[in-house]
Amino acid sequence: MTTYDISEVLPHIDPTRLDYQSWVNVGMALKDAGHPVSDWDAWSQRDAARYRPGECEKKWAGFRGAPNPVTAGTIVQMARDQGWEPQRDEGYALDWDSVIGARDEQVIVDANWIESKDVPDPEHWDPAAQLTRYLELLFEASETVGYVTESWEKEGRYLPTKGAYDRTAGQLIEQLSKCKGDIGAVVGDYKAEAGAWIRFNPLDGKGVKNENVTEYRFALVESDAMPIEQQYAIIHELELPVAVLVHSGKKSLHAIVRIDAANYDEYRKRVDYLYTVCQKNGLKIDSQNRNPSRLSRMPGAVRDGRKQFIVAENMGKANYDQWHEWIEGVNDDLPEPESMRDAWDNLPPLSPALIDGVLRQGHKMLLAGPSKAGKSYALIELCIAIAEGRKWMSWPCARGKVMYVNLELDRASCLHRFRDVYQVLGWQPAGLDNIDVWNLRGKAIPMDKLAPKLIRRAAKRGYIAIVIDPIYKVITGDENSADQMANFCNQFDKVCTELGCAVIYCHHHSKGQQGQKRSMDRASGSGVFARDPDAMLDMIELEPTETLTKQEGNKAVCAVAAEWLNRCATVTDWAEYVSQDMLCSAPQMLAACQKLLSPWAFKDFSEAAGAAREAAARRTAWRIEGTLREFPRFDPVNLWFNYPIHVVDTVGSLKDIDAEGDGPTYQRNFKNKKPKEVSEKERKVSLETAFQACNMGGKVTVGGLAEYLGVTEKTVRNRIKDHGGYWIDGGTVGEKQ
């Protein structure tokens, strides 16, 4: 029978097409399969018209099981009814010794060839010592223990009563030390035919149900459908993380397995996984033992003349996580080592370049930079360059299909940005069919969950690059933890390997000035971010001098003047009236335009020249440095961020400009401060730039401005108040008429 991952099947069911009872059935099936209520709630939100917050939780609490429960098969059938078809296994080649049948992961033991393992009897029978050791292995001294010595007979079987749950492990151990081997004097006498029972998880002292369990620490693995010696051998071969293994006094072993779950939902998932592995490996276990409040056999008791005793303790792996990792790793699909001698004369071809001199196809690239660097615009420019097969900044790009995974912008803003960048670049949109945008704002999930969904959607699209912007939305774990970030970055490897395309993503700088750091050390978080990608491009802001700023404003005015004279001059050949020196002087070009343009044209030109000067003052300067694995390091690339695109400084104006925080410490600490009026003007200009940047088809918010400027919302409110040209209504910002 085929087993499906319900979390992968559920997205193929559209809740808007279901009636109320079918919706309830999905919830019941999810609970029966061990899923948390959050899975049902998240899926239900897709039906926005009927979704009610909190309704799933209320219904969930009422799902208490039924003689004929709704199972995961219901979800599979619903998905099939709505058109879903499972992916078919393509199969594999058989050799002469192959066994016809499905390959299965998590299979460690061949039950047909397992050698039985003798179960040793206790050398010295000391009932009190047996029970004491059991309590020491499973409980803290202050934890309440549940146990049962009273039983009743039904159809020849002895069944336990509710039992006692009024003493701690410490109290029981102390009393056992004084009982002279008579455990009945401590826990009560039991029937010789029935034996005694004990619960392996601590209780709250108020009852013996699942809700009374205080720590989901252990689970019970029991099999009575095969010889004990074979049970023992399989448990040993599977390296189950067994805290204590107890002989039941009859035909089964009771393995108390470490689960260490944080809550009941995690306990159910881990126990389901544990039982699945056991069943696949020939250990025919009793599936009714799943409950954390379940009773097991008490060591130290005697059952119908046969001892209930500890067979082994601390078997297998140290904990559940180690065991789970080991199980998943046993059946790997890793390639075998190969001889360099064999490959020497038959080397595989290198992947072609995606970004010439920077990145190969199928590799990974990180773009890092601070706030206001226009990283998203830079990645949109890159997508367009790949789609059109043109240059990105100063690097030629291969032409092909690209997916832009948008995690931050609303759909309208994102699509408008692509069009705006196309228009400012002045490129004909011939490659629009090469650009796909996956808008996931508000729907982002951790990268380990996103990667398989991304791979499934992109598998047959033929992308040569996938751009993920930004990664902080999908980071799993602590970004300062090397091992957690290594696991996170491994998800990009999976995408590259499965799709054969490049993965390009962006990340932010750490706090503080970056000029004194190496480019690869500026990204926030663990150094894994710098070491993992095949190419890392880092953007750092430059600090143009006042003279350079004036020069750039002068150039902008001169360029506008030449454009207007070409279109609207009152003479046929205006160049005869303008010298080469005049072409480089804004005042002289203004004077020339006043003479050579009609009054109405000069008025419009004056407005355009003023706008060009302001735009030149608003633009910021940046330097890109690279750390490359496949190519030699390139010289730093200087550029202007002339909203909404980056323009390479081809004339060398920025070549000798220091980066933010550059220079000796004494210069950084004691350099002259800017005059107050200059600082105030810069703040006004930066606010205006931020307002325009955030006003892309949507309302501007205080939070959005704060994020763009890299300051607090309080600072934004103060700057708006000082500026005088904007209004605030709650968290919304607008421009005064």
Image (tube, grey):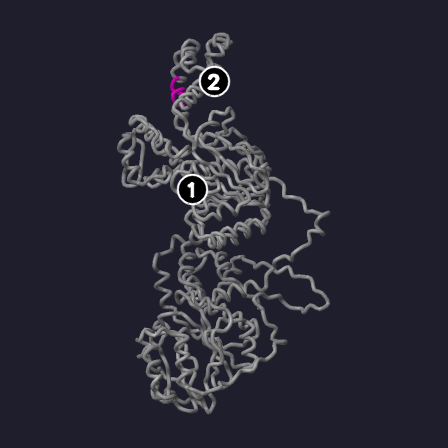
Q: Which residue is mark 2?
A: 563
Q: Is residue 601 above or below residue 161?
A: above
Task: Verify CB contact (< 8 Å) between mark 1 and mark 2.
Answer: no
Task: Provide the residue span drawn in magenta.
Answer: 606-612
x and y percentages locating residue 727 in the rendered image: 28, 34
Say left or right for 9 vs 702.
right
- Residue 111 or residue 547, whichever sits in front: 547
- Side of 248 relative to 212 (left or right): right
Q: Main secondary structure of the magenta part?
A: helix
Q: 6 or 623, which is in the foreground?
A: 623
Along the line of sight, which residue is nearer the eye, 462 or 97? 97
Q: Amino acid at mark 1?
A: His
The residue located at (51%, 67%) in the rendering is 323
Quarter residue 298 falls in: bottom left
Residue position marked by numbered label 1 in the rendering? 509
Question: What is the three-letter code of the residue carrying label 2?
Answer: Glu
Q: Residue 72: x and y, percent?
A: 49, 66
Residue drawn at the location 46% of the way across and 12% of the way down: 582
Neighbor class of circle 2 (other Cα within 10 Å; few <14, some 14-19, many 20+) is few
Image quadrant occupied by the N terminus: bottom right
**Who's the residue at 54% across and 37% down the image?**
432
Residue 400 placement: quadrant: top right
Look at the image and say whether residue 492 sits in the magenta stretch: no
Of tags 1 and 2, the one toward the viewer is: 1
